[in-house]
Structure formats: structure tokens, C-alpha cells
Amino acid sequence: MEAMTGKKPTIKDVARLAGVSFKTVSRVVNNEAWVSDEIKAKVQAVIETLNYQPNRTARLMRTAPFSLAFVYDNPNSHYVIEMQNGILSECRRKGFELVIHPTDSGSDLVRQELSTMIGSNQVGGVILTPPLSENSELVQQLLAQQAKVVRIVSGAAPPDELCPTIYVDDEAAGRAMTEYLLAQGHRRIAFLGYRADHRSSVGRYRGYCAALEQAGIELSPELVISGDFTFDSGVAMTEQLLALAEPATALFGCNDEIAAGALFAARMKQLAVPADLSIVGFENSPFSRQTWPKLTTVHQPNADMAAKAAAMLIALMLEPDEQPPHCGFHLQLVTRDSVEKLTK
């Protein structure tokens, strides 16, 4: 049995050494049913070995919720599924239940909706994803209701200290992708999917602008086209782009669905990719791997980010006085066959 030194043992130590979930330890501590005699004896042995004394958190677990919620407003099914799977993996490992809660971030009722969910005392913690995670008023409201909150946001650092945050540097990744296209000789590079109300889109756009400026290339407003993060929007934006008198030689889709739609639109115009038009995306979703040619993109580890967010939230729910540190994720360029080096 592992020896403990210095720090007072916690319920997390008991769960780890006994090889069970926090929920199981809580049930043993509170003498609840549905725990086998074998597991009960195993947990009790660890408790005695560590001289563990149940603290206020453990005692409150008898009535505290063992559910957390994944709250999202995102049309990208791949993103949602990867996030859901990442959170589920951690919930199953720790003995927590997951509530999946899609919502409309633009609705006037979203704050009331989430307030009701927390007030029902069935959900003790919430993982918020963009654009909900960017709404500081919503975060403050949830915290005021004693809910535990972890956010996933775009940025080179956490936006504030309201709650633990997972952050990704979209601007650095957008800059790296644009620099890659510039290195292949492209000078007229389009940016598709700009959304002023979407922080991830804004970050990628800023990286695109910074790379162009560093290369001494003036930004062409007609090459920046606003739209949604969907396949159909990618088709429509590309049709608009291809109608320009001076076409782009490369196209940066703000996500892989946009890029896949761009590829479809280019084919409908009898353009060869990448010979006539290089196309790149963002996220490394199945869209990027199931097209022909496969898309150069940026890998965003959604499942890993979600699992980390769940681990942080569960830790916060179990030990509310010990706030987990923020965690940043690095995004990596994935080069495939959808980009061709310009020789003229």
C-alpha cells in the first residue's frame, strides 16, 4: 500500500488507492446500499491504512449531485460528439453521470434555462463551450448559484479568473496556417467563415492578418468572407469568392466543414484542387480525412480538451476549496494533399 506523507489524505487518495470511483468511496463512507461486501472491505482497508477522516465535502456527498452538464450551442456534430466522448470517458472513470444539454446561446431564455437546471439540484457542475463560455454574465450567474463551472475558450490565456478554464490559441494556429500557405508561394489567400461574434473565428482571422502583415502583403477585404461553420455555407462563400475578377490561389476555411464545402464548390466549377486552388481547413475532423484530396488542416484535440475539462470540474466538485489551475492546449498543423506550391 502506498504511503502518504505530509498532506492529510483526501477522498481522492482513497479512491485512487482502492481502484474505485469517488462515488463508491462516498457510498462506503455514508454506509449506503448498492456496494458489494468485497468492494466495501477494500475501501475500508484503504481508509484505515491512510487514517482517512471524511471531511465536510465527503459528508455532504450523501445529498450532493453526482452529475455534471455539457452545455453547448454548436452546429458542428463532429465537435459535439468528440467533446461528449471526452467528457464521458472521464465521468465513467470517476463514477459521475453526464447530462447533455444543447441550447440556443442567442435566446433570451438561456440564462433562465440553465438557472433552472442548476436549481433542480441534479447538476452540480457545468462545462461551457463557445459561444456560451464567452458570456461572462452567464458564468457569473451560475457561480452565484453555487454551481461549479469550467469553460473552454479561445485565447492565448484565460480571459479572467472567474473559474478554471481550458484555452486554445486559435490566433497562433491561424497564423501558422497562413504562414504555411505563404511559404508555398501563395499571395492571394482567402479567409472564409469570419464571424465577429465567434471568438474562435476572430482568433483565426487575427492570425491570418498578422501573417499577411509580416509578409508585407496588404489585406484584401474582398477575400475575407463571412459565413457559418457549415458545409453549405462553405459552398456559398466559395461561389462568392470564385466570382471575383481576380481569384484567390489559396483558401483558408475557418473549419473543415467550410473547407469541404469549398472543395465541392471548386469541383462544380471544374477547378482542380490543389492545381487550380489550394484549400485548407481547421480542426482535423472526419471532413478533412474523407475528402479527396485530403485536407491540410489544424489538429484541435477536442476529446482531450473535454476530458481535461471534466477532470477539472470533478475535482472542483469534490474539493471546492482547491480550484484547479487553468490549462492551455497547443494546436498543430497537419499537412496533406490539398495544397500545391506555386511555381509561377
Image: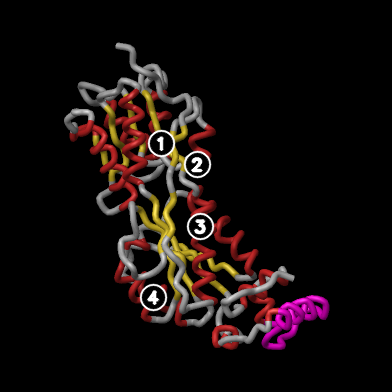
Residue at numbered disc 2: 285
Label 4: few (<14), some or many (≥20) within 10 Å?
Answer: many
Where is 17 relative to 35, above or below? above
Q: Residue 303 location, x and y as percent?
A: 53, 52
Q: Which residue is at a point 48% across and 65% down the rendered structure image?
A: 101
Foreground tag (1 vs 3): 3
Q: Looking at the image, can residue 75 be seen?
A: yes
Tell me which segment is drawn in magenta: 27-49
Q: Nearer the viewer, residue 324 or 32?
A: 324
Judged from this view, the residue extending furthest toward the top is 344
User: Residue 306's mark?
Assistant: 3
Q: Is residue 35 magenta?
A: yes
Q: Which residue is at a point 42% across and 21% down the rendered structure image?
A: 273
Relative side of 184 to 20, left or right? left
Does dot 3 land on a helix, a strand or a loop?
helix
Label 2: few (<14), some or many (≥20) within 10 Å?
Answer: many
Where is 72 relative to 1, above or below? above
Does dot 1 land on a helix, a strand or a loop?
loop
Does dot 2 land on a helix, a strand or a loop?
loop
Distance from the alpha carbon under mark 1 to that under mark 3: 21 Å
User: Residue 142's mark?
Assistant: 4
Majority secondary structure of magenta residues? helix
User: Residue 12's mark?
Assistant: none
Where is 270 relative to 280, above or below? above
The reply to whether dot 1 and dot 3 touch (C-beta < 8 Å) is no
Quarter residue 67 falls in: bottom right
Residue at numbered disc 1: 281
Q: Residue 87 location, x and y as percent?
A: 55, 60
Q: Is residue 308 magenta?
A: no
Does dot 4 land on a helix, a strand or a loop?
helix
